[in-house]
């Protein structure tokens, strides 16, 4: 069920995992960019995305009938930009004129500065058109799921699997061919698949129905039927339950409140409409429903666990698109709290540190540690598995250790990862195994931090302002923090070297941990 949702996530994560992780290597090895130039190009994406995400989500909410075509067109334009980088790379790196080379007639000597400008322009186009598609897919899936939006995690899970396998596939392809062009072919194929799937998306097919959360019915009185009757007006409503969920609940032997749909003409004040078209606006509802269901079944379920993790647009504006001025947090009420301010600073700086590590990791592994591309490819599955496990057990871990200790554990794991990188010796089997094992610390660091941060931001803000809160969280971590980290990481890698880059990242992470801990002191509890 909901096959189109799963396919959308498989395709979007495949194209987002094929090119971006390996592009720093391509910029360095093929285009000859310095590390600071690479950092400049990489920093474009998070800043542009902060504008593009709310813009495109606003457009599809205003024109829901164009949701699928818009995703297809933006993927086409952004994908063309990335393929353009490959054409430029092949053109400037060709020593002889190849009759089969598409652009051989335009072959020319380009200065390094000119190359940076051209590639930056193409990277900007990719960030503006393609990167927001993850938010558009989230929004489309939420609309398609309707009353069953608690099953979001079961759809999103396929994206995580796709990302890990795609990174592995690209690494193996590069290793076999000895050319970095393989990343573009996987990216191009994934983009075409996504365009096809997006073209068939129709978020309006259930527009005549509004999902409702209905109270439990007395099965002894109602009988064992597939229809339930609303007491107030006698209308019949049909219960919606997926095969996997029904099997899960039946095996556990629990009775859980159902998710139902009712005709739009029905108006009953005691029913609560749960459906919100924007993915950010639905964050709290999904998490609460997933929590209730997990408690009811008394066990772990990976899809439900992932449903607890917010899928937020990576911009503060994404949370403000559908919120009036009355929903914006008052500086005097929330943002003057030391605990809130230190937590927001922590979110920003942790995004900064992770950006430094992630954006230059493949470059470090390939050139500093001499790790083969076939080994580098395995970082995808390793990271994906540990992230999913951390997301799955985040609720249980938080109940055991508490929010403060969870955030501190994430920082300690990240600091340890950075420091261990600095003592690894290049070109050895032990180093390859160690570097690959360190990827598990990324899953622990990011997975634990993000799952805990989403929940903590919900607690800071009142219910009517939590969409804004999640937008702020995404903007600070994935927007400003990631952009600044890419810029700073590039300069540190170029002028200080990779060892000092990781040392400084560890130092910033330690300072960030201290800032967070100060904000958690009892005196700042109000």
Image (tube, rainbow, N blue to C red):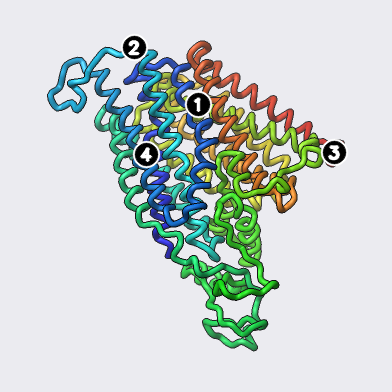
**Between marks 1 and 3, how big is the CA–CA gap?**
38 Å
- Per the image, the residue denoted by label 3 is 522
**Element at badge 2?**
loop
Which circle, 4 or 2, is nearer the viewer? 2
Q: Residue 456, can we see it?
A: no
**Element at badge 4?**
helix
Label whose residue precedes the other's in the sequence (1 or 4): 1
**What residue sits 75% from the left and 50% below the top?**
462
Q: Are marks 3 and 2 in contact (CB under 8 Å)?
A: no
- Which label was assigned to residue 43? 1
Most foreground residue, 187 or 169: 187
**Element at badge 1?**
helix
**Between marks 4 and 3, how big is the CA–CA gap?**
46 Å
- Per the image, the residue denoted by label 2 is 111
**Element at badge 3?**
helix
Figure quadrant of residue 286: bottom right
**What residue sits 68% from the left and 48% below the top?**
324
**Position of residue 281 measured from the top left corner of the image (x, y, whole percent):** 61, 52
Quarter of the image containing the N terminus?
Answer: bottom left
Which circle, 1 or 3, is nearer the viewer? 1
Q: Is residue 132 above or below residue 428?
A: below
Categorize mark 1 by other alpha carbons within 10 Å: few (<14), some (14-19), many (20+). many
Which circle, 3 or 2, is nearer the viewer? 2
Label whose residue precedes the other's in the sequence (4 or 2): 2
**Between marks 1 and 4, how big is the CA–CA gap?**
25 Å
Label whose residue precedes the other's in the sequence (4 or 3): 4
């Amino acid at each position: 069920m909901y096959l189109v949702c799963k396919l959308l996530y498989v395709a979007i994560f495949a194209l987002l995992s094929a090119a971006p992780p390996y592009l720093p290597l391509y910029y360095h090895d093929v285009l000859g960019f310095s590390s600071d130039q690479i950092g400049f190009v990489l920093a474009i994406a998070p800043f542009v995305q902060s504008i593009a995400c709310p813009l495109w989500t606003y457009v599809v909410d205003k024109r829901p009938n164009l949701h699928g075509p818009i995703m297809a067109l933006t993927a086409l334009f952004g994908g063309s930009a990335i393929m353009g980088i490959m054409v430029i790379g092949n053109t400037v790196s060709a020593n002889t004129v190849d009759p089969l080379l598409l652009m051989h007639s335009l072959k020319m000597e380009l200065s390094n500065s000119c190359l940076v400008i051209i590639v930056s322009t193409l990277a900007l186009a990719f960030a503006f058109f393609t990167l927001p598609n993850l938010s558009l897919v989230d929004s489309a899936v939420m609309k398609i799921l309707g009353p069953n939006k608690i099953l979001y995690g079961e759809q999103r899970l396929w994206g995580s699997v796709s990302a890990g396998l795609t990174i592995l596939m690209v690494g193996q392809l590069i290793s076999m061919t000895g050319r970095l062009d393989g990343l573009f072919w996987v990216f191009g194929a994934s983009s075409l698949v996504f365009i096809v799937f997006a073209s068939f998306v129709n978020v309006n097919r259930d527009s005549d129905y509004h999902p409702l959360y209905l109270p439990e019915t007395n099965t002894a009185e109602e009988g064992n039927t597939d229809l339930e009757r609303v007491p107030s007006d006698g209308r019949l409503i049909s219960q919606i339950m997926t095969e996997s969920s029904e099997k899960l609940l039946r095996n556990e032997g629990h009775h859980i409140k159902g998710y139902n749909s009712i005709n739009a003409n029905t108006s009953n004040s005691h029913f609560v409409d749960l459906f919100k078209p924007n993915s950010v606006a639905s964050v709290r509802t999904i998490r609460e429903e997933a929590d209730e269901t997990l408690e009811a079944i008394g066990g772990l379920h990976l899809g439900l666990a992932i449903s607890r993790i917010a899928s937020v647009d990576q911009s503060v504006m994404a949370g403000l698109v559908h919120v009036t001025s009355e929903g914006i947090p008052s500086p005097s009420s929330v943002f003057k709290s030391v605990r809130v301010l230190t937590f927001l600073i922590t979110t920003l700086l942790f995004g900064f540190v992770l950006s430094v590590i992630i954006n230059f990791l493949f470059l470090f592994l390939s050139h500093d540690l001499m790790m083969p591309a076939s080994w580098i490819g395995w970082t995808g599955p390793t990271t994906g598995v540990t992230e999913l496990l951390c997301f799955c057990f985040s609720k249980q871990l938080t109940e055991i250790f508490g929010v403060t200790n969870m955030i501190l554990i994430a920082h300690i794991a990240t600091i340890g990862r950075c420091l261990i990188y600095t003592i690894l010796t290049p070109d050895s089997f032990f180093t390859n195994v160690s570097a690959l094992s360190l990827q598990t610390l990324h899953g622990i660091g990011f997975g634990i931090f993000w799952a805990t941060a989403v929940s903590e931001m919900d607690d800071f803000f009142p219910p009517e302002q939590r969409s804004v809160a999640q937008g702020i969280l995404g903007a600070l971590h994935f927007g400003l923090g990631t952009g600044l980290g890419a810029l700073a990481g590039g300069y540190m890698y170029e002028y200080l070297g990779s060892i000092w880059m990781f040392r400084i990242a560890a130092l910033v992470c330690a300072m960030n941990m201290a800032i967070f801990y100060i904000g958690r002191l009892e005196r700042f509890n109000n």
